């Protein structure tokens, strides 16, 4: 009697592993996208709290740049690199009589795509209102 697996047994094992991969991989990708999007919203929330705190302490005058938030003592933002790309998102802020910051995915996931860093872009404006929209038109 020979020991080992027959070809049918090996094919069944391979089919089960493939099925598990088909079920698991899309869920892992969705988790990564959700994590990226949550991180982007949190970064915008941190920036907006810093801007609103700055305005409250400076007679309702909002900062002119991100530097106004990081160079004062104590700083409103500890992370001077907060606007650098991170978590699959790029950030852009405009400071002019208020603020408007946008978080845009590095690789937008469109319908039918399977890889990317996010499906939505997020914007925060003066007053701490965060809005979201699809990252493609």
Image: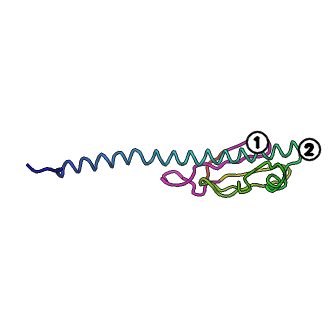
Callout count: 2
Q: What stretch is highlighted in magenta?
A: 104-131
Q: Earlier in the sequence, mark 2 or mark 1?
A: 2
Magenta span: chief secondary structure: loop
Decide which of 131, 103 is in the foreground and name it. 103
Question: Furthest-front residue in view?
Answer: 73
Q: Residue at x 22, y 50 (%)?
A: 10
Question: Furthest-left residue in view?
Answer: 1
Q: Which residue is drawn at 63% across and 47% down?
A: 39
List the residue tagged with mark 2. Answer: 59
The residue carrying pointer 1 sits among few (fewer than 14), some (14 to 19) or many (20 or more) residues within 10 Å by Cα, namely: some
- Where does the image place residue 124, in percent across and percent down from the top left? 73, 46
- Where does the image place residue 99, in percent across and percent down from the top left? 80, 50
Q: Which residue is drawn at 28% across and 50% down?
A: 14
The residue carrying pointer 2 sits among few (fewer than 14), some (14 to 19) or many (20 or more) residues within 10 Å by Cα, namely: few
List the residue tagged with mark 1. Answer: 128
Using the numbered discs, state the Cα–Cα distance from disc 2 to disc 1 in whole angstroms: 17 Å
Answer whether residue 105 is magenta in the image: yes
Is 87 located above or below residue 59 in the figure? Answer: below
- Where does the image place residue 126, in percent across and percent down from the top left? 80, 45
Q: Is mark 1 on a helix, strand or loop?
A: loop
Q: Which color scheme does this rendered protein use?
A: rainbow
Q: Is mark 2 on a helix, strand or loop?
A: loop
Q: Residue at x 71, y 54 (%)?
A: 82
């Amino acid at each position: 009697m020979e020991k080992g697996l027959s070809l049918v047994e090996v094919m069944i094992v391979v089919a089960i592993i493939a099925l598990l991969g088909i079920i698991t991989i899309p869920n892992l990708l969705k988790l990564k996208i959700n994590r990226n999007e949550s991180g982007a919203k949190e970064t915008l929330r941190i920036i907006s709290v810093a801007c609103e705190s700055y305005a409250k302490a400076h007679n309702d005058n909002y900062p002119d740049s991100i530097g106004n938030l990081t160079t004062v003592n104590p700083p409103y933002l500890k992370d001077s690199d907060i606007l650098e790309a991170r978590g699959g998102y790029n950030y852009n802020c405009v400071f002019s009589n208020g603020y408007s910051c946008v978080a845009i995915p590095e690789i937008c996931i469109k319908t039918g795509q399977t890889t990317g860093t996010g499906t939505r872009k997020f914007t925060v404006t003066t007053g701490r209102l965060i809005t979201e929209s699809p990252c493609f038109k």
